[in-house]
Image (spheres, grey):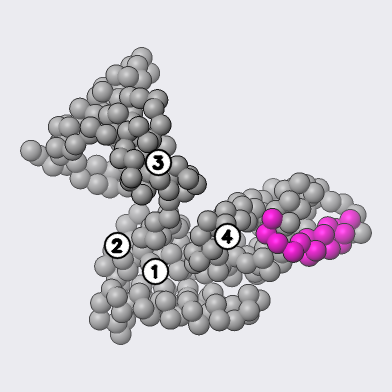
Amino acid sequence: MAKAEVRCPVCGTSFVVGNSGNAVTELNDGIHFLVPETVRNENVTKSSRVDLRLNALKDSGINVDKLQALMQSNDDLKSIFDSDDPIIAEISKGGFIRNPELFRRWITAQTFRLLDDPNGWTHAVRRRYDAKYVVDMTKRELGIRIELERKCPKDVRNKFFTLWDFKRIFEEMITYNEAIYKLDDKREMEQLINSAESLGDLSNIVNNCIRWRFKWNCSFKPKTWLNCFKGAGAYYTLQNIIRTHGLVLPKCKDMNESLEWVDNVFKSIIGYEPRDRRWDILMSVLVSAVKETGFELKY
């Protein structure tokens, strides 16, 4: 059976399928489906789409027995999968699966786009993202951190944006918040932010007690936000290009030694208090490795 490489027009993922017919992928709830062009018609019923997708998978030699039951039934997971399946048990219990081998791959593409800027990473960040993005992104990260603290307290993602970092970021953004006019009110909001004793307290304050509005051309970025953003971008990019793209760091002999080197740098940085963490060191490791090895990422 002929093989063909398909590139998803939604997210850019490339993968090989067993059919070479005219087909594209459709991203639905995070799952790629191979869909013939003729199927992408609004008049086609949902059940017909399901059948055609299942047939395409069958033609590629994939066992779709359980997938068929899942896609065509409204039954719960326990009635479709084995009752003692640990993954299904974990989904049923908390709705969350921890996969330590996934390293936020979209950040890798984002980081390389920023690094490709002729004026450098920092200039690209200042040009591409405005003050509203900083607050919205930081609020989302705060919400994720609260969930991780409960479900995966040892996740490395908890090390980049700490409570101290969140408070400093929101405190600095208050200065440029157009929704608060009076200087005394701004100081009061800064004090309220600093009074937060937990991530939950801070989330309640920035989401429910403070309205945010910025001028359309406000591009202010707190140094703390830039530092944390840089650290997360460098760390997850290094993990991805070493694990899945074959990059070996200079002076390292293989993947394992490269990962160990990154881990040692990471541990040395988090050994300091949040206010003293220099995530630019990790970014320097990434930039120098890419330059010395001539590594190119296609995204």
Q: Which residue is mark 1?
A: 238
Name the magenta segment's main secondary structure. helix
Which of labels 1 and 4 is toward the front?
A: 4
Task: Give the mark, 1 or 4, whose residue is nearer the N terminus.
Answer: 4
As measured in the structure, the alpha-carbon distance from the residue carrying label 2 to the one carrying label 3 is 20 Å
As measured in the structure, the alpha-carbon distance from the residue carrying label 4 to the one carrying label 2 is 28 Å
Name the side, left or right, on which 226 lies relative to 56.
Answer: right
Amino acid residing under circle 3: Gly
- Residue at 32%, 33% in the rendered image: 80
Q: Amino acid at mark 1?
A: Leu
Which residue bears the numbered disc 2?
244
From the viewer's perspective, tell me whether residue 176 is left or right of residue 121.
Answer: right
Q: Are marks 1 and 4 in contact (CB under 8 Å)?
A: no
The residue under the point 28% across, 73% down is 255
Q: Which residues are magenta?
A: 185-200
Q: Earlier in the sequence, mark 1 or mark 2?
A: 1
Q: Residue at x 36, y 60 (%)?
A: 101
Whether label 2 touches label 3, CB < 8 Å: no
Q: Earlier in the sequence, mark 4 or mark 2?
A: 4
Q: Nearer the viewer, mark 3 or mark 1?
A: 3
Contact between marks 3 and 1 (CB within 8 A): the answer is no
> Which amino acid is tagged 2?
Thr
Quarter of the image where the N terminus is located: top left
Q: Which residue is mark 3?
A: 30
Q: Nearer the viewer, mark 4 or mark 2?
A: 4
Quarter of the image for the C terminus: give it.
bottom left
